[in-house]
Image (cartoon, coloured by chain):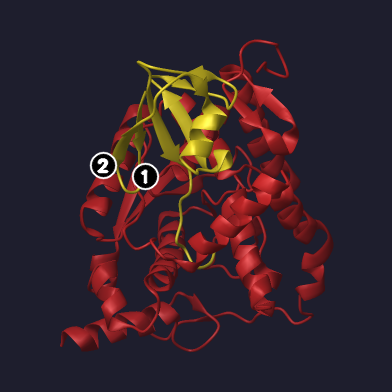
Chain colours: A red, B yellow
Amino acid sequence: MKCRKCGAGAVIELPRHNAAFCAPDFQEFFRKQVAEAIRKHKMFTTEEPVLVAVSGGKDSLALWDVLIETGYQTAGLYLDLGIFDYSVESKARCEAFAASRGQKLIVESVAESVGAGIPEVQKATRRPTCSACGLSKRYLMNRAAVDHGYPVIATGHNLDDEAAVLFGNVLHWQMDPLARQSPALASTHPKLARRVKPLYRLSERETAAYAFLRRIDYIVDECPFAKGATSIAHKQILDRLEEASPGAKHNFLFGFLEKARGVFEGSEPTVLNECAICGQVTTGEICAFCKLSDQVKRRRA
Amino acid sequence: MKIKLRNPSREVELPGRKRVKDVLRELDILPGTVLVIRGADLLTADEVVGDGDELEVRPVMSGGSATS
């Protein structure tokens, strides 16, 4: 198999683009896709600092690597979820990456903020583990960005992540989440940082290949709580579709973003308040994170 | 050839020379869900591998997050 661009031996084939690339040309393709995502959705400029949420996995470290290489001002944010050895190892990967690139890494601990790590938080609530974890991560990411003066948070969500979320939301016709699903979410409150997903044009196989070719030491093993997660089941279904029809995931997600998302947007913007307990943004009086913390405290009392 | 698989970690051996796509078919793995690695190299689906090769089949799926 030959590189589409230079004719040298290819290291990766991309059936959805009907193309194959050698290592240097694949990395150029990857960087161009990230640049196009940033340009198309006006995600951020080189003039403003970007907080990159990193987990130690391939996507977030690949994203941080591309942004550093491109010349953006970045710092990493690692959220210590307290998930046994998995968190210990993923934190070590982030610290090593940051040190090797001379970048700042901010570390926030779920246990310090909520009173317990994710395994115990899950026991204290009726939420599925990934739901309690996602809630905590979104809250802590935003709080860290606001506290440290970063106007924008970049996450490593890729095309597969976004297609799987879309699939789940469509299955249940979740109108509000469908309206909100976007590669770039604007700030609608002084205490709300913008959230952007510069990898949304790239599949997770492409981010894994980029991380491998860049010799990024990422954590390959899966989070122990991801096993059996609904989003994983949705990804597996979409993988079958993609195998039968290359480009299916791309068409599903991009078709939604370009043609259908607007249909779900309501005319009334969501009103944001400041939580009566912590002061962070919420649609109600008390934010979901403070309610979660309260549940954990009561269980431990 | 020796093949290292993950999630869960295990090792299998397959005999003969064959293309990577045929190795994956024998293992019932969709090509779009893994990287196939030999040493420091990524292998494409039409690459021929055989006795003496040590491969890693590395899954690319991540996640578990309920929403993004």
Residue under label 2: A92
- The amino acid pointed to by label 1 is Gly
Find residue A165 and report its horizontal and vertical position in percent: 59, 64
| Circle 1 residues within 10 Å: few <14, some 14–19, many ≥20 | many
* One can see residue A29 in this view: yes
Q: Residue furthest front?
A: B16
- The amino acid pointed to by label 2 is Ala
Q: Chain of mark 2?
A: A
Find residue A262 and report its horizontal and vertical position in percent: 80, 68
| Element under disc 2 | helix
Find residue B21 and report its horizontal and vertical position in percent: 56, 31
Tags 2 and 1 in contact by the CB under 8 Å rule?
A: yes
Q: Is residue B5 above or below residue A25?
A: below
Quick check: A248 left or right of A285?
right
Q: Is residue B12 above or below residue A20?
A: below
Q: Residue at x 67, y 53 (%)?
A: A241
| Circle 2 residues within 10 Å: few <14, some 14–19, many ≥20 | some
